[in-house]
Image (tube, rainbow, N blue to C red):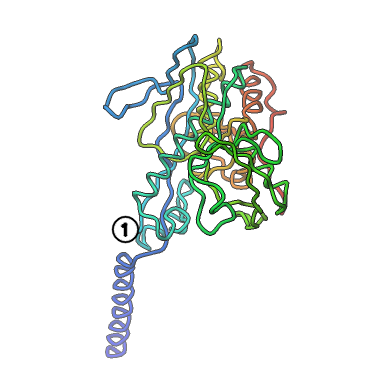
């Protein structure tokens, strides 16, 4: 009897030891995932720390009257835990599954294969600069300013339809006879052609040239067909007033809408938000179209924890929002700058918010 108990005890302890060794071992096994968590929140109506370490207005305008603001118009961010050099452990990933403020995502979605951390940071910094330009253009045009725009080629990617036909620094003047005053016009015309040849008029070294390109078909992240000619673009604007957006150490395009709202609020009398604490996210283009972003759930929690009670979310992110809104936060969906302003107008006036657009899950 005693012998059987001793044997059972030894077997049990051995199994426990093996389990503990396996668990400890997992803490050192590299994974193919990173963790997303809420990042810092910045009030576009407030201040930020410059590259020199000074506290400066996040939005500063010269050439037009600025007005007092109130409340907040917070832009939200996401922090990434891990990289290709040091991924989170399996133990850390397991803990994340029990934390609604965090998410586990494949490392390739954040750090693409073959792209270094430095290259990723440079890319995100460039996207932030472009986002600020697009936000400024959208805000100023919303307020009635004329904004001159020049669309230029940054790169014609090798082994694509544009290779050998377009060059860096080409200015795109027109596509199929339509003047190109924004990258959106170019992209939309290419999509509408559905693979048919398009005719481009470009300026190169001071001379106008005509080229024809046949777009190639690929698919987007949702598996939908898209047509590309294989170029990266930049848009240079001639703004009638000087708008400085000062925010260091934050990259990517997702703050665009909040930048635009902050600019509009600064350039108009009254409080756009009615003095309330509002947060949001979303890309924006010069036409005022609000686009999808990543990490929406983490941004919802980051906004709530920073004191926001109202959140503006891109309509295209709504499927990720439904069922994941933290207590104390009211979320409205938006697809344009104008719609965002309409939502804030109702909120500022204390109107009936029950009729404002909210997120619902779309079938399919």
Q: Give the residue at x 54% y 53%.
A: 164
Q: Give the residue at x 71% y 41%.
A: 176
As displayed, is residue 17 above or below residue 171? Answer: below
As displayed, is residue 192 above or below residue 222? Answer: above
Q: Please state if 351 lies on the left or on the right of 117 as rendered.
A: right
Packing grade of label 1 (10 A; few <14, some 14-19, many >=20) is: few
Q: Give the residue at x 31% y 22%.
A: 55
Q: Please state if 179 lies on the left or on the right of 302 as rendered.
A: right
As displayed, is residue 114 above or below residue 292? Answer: below
The image shows residue 258 at horizontal and vertical percentages of: 52, 29
The one of 222 and 233 positioned closer to us in this rendering: 233
Q: Is residue 106 visible?
A: yes
The image shows residue 204 at horizontal and vertical percentages of: 53, 39
List the single residue furthest toward the front. 207
The one of 190 and 315 positioned closer to us in this rendering: 190
Count of marks overlaid on the render: 1
Quarter residue 246 falls in: top left
Quarter residue 20 falls in: bottom left
The image shows residue 4 at horizontal and vertical percentages of: 31, 89
Q: Which residue is mark 1?
A: 86
As displayed, is residue 344 above or below residue 176? Answer: above
Q: Secondary structure at mark 1?
A: loop
The image shows residue 234 at horizontal and vertical percentages of: 51, 38
């Amino acid at each position: 009897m005693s012998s059987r108990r001793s044997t059972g005890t030894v077997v049990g302890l051995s199994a426990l030891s093996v389990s503990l060794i396996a668990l400890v071992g997992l803490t050192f096994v590299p994974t193919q995932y990173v963790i997303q968590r809420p990042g810092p929140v910045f009030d576009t109506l407030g201040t930020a720390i410059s590259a020199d370490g000074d506290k400066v207005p996040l939005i500063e305008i010269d050439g037009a009257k600025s007005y007092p603001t109130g409340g907040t118009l917070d832009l939200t961010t996401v922090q990434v835990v891990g990289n290709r050099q040091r991924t989170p452990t399996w133990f850390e990933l397991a803990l994340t599954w029990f934390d609604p403020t965090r998410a586990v995502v494949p490392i390739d979605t954040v750090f693409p294969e073959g792209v270094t951390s430095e290259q990723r940071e440079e890319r995100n910094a460039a996207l932030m600069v472009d986002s600020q330009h697009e936000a400024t253009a959208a805000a100023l045009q919303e307020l009635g300013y004329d904004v001159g725009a020049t669309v230029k080629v940054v790169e014609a990617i090798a082994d694509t339809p544009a290779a050998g036909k377009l060059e860096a620094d080409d200015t795109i003047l027109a596509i199929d006879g339509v003047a190109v005053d924004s990258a959106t016009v170019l992209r939309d015309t290419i999509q509408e052609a559905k693979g048919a040849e398009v005719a481009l008029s470009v300026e190169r070294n001071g001379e106008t040239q005509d080229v024809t390109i046949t777009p190639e078909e690929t698919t987007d992240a949702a598996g939908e067909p898209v047509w590309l000619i294989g170029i990266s673009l930049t848009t240079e604007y001639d703004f009638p007033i000087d708008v400085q957006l000062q925010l260091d150490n934050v990259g990517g395009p997702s703050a665009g809408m909040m930048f635009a709202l902050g600019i509009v609020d600064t350039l108009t009398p009254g409080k756009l938000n009615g003095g309330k604490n509002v947060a949001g996210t979303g890309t924006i283009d010069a036409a005022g179209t609000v686009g999808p972003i990543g990490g929406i759930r983490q941004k919802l929690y980051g906004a709530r924890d920073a004191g926001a009670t109202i959140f503006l979310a891109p309509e295209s992110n709504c499927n990720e929002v439904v069922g994941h809104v933290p207590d104390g936060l009211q979320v409205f969906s938006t697809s344009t700058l104008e719609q965002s302003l309409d939502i804030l107008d109702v909120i500022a006036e204390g109107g009936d918010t029950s009729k404002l657009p909210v997120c619902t899950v779309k079938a399919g």
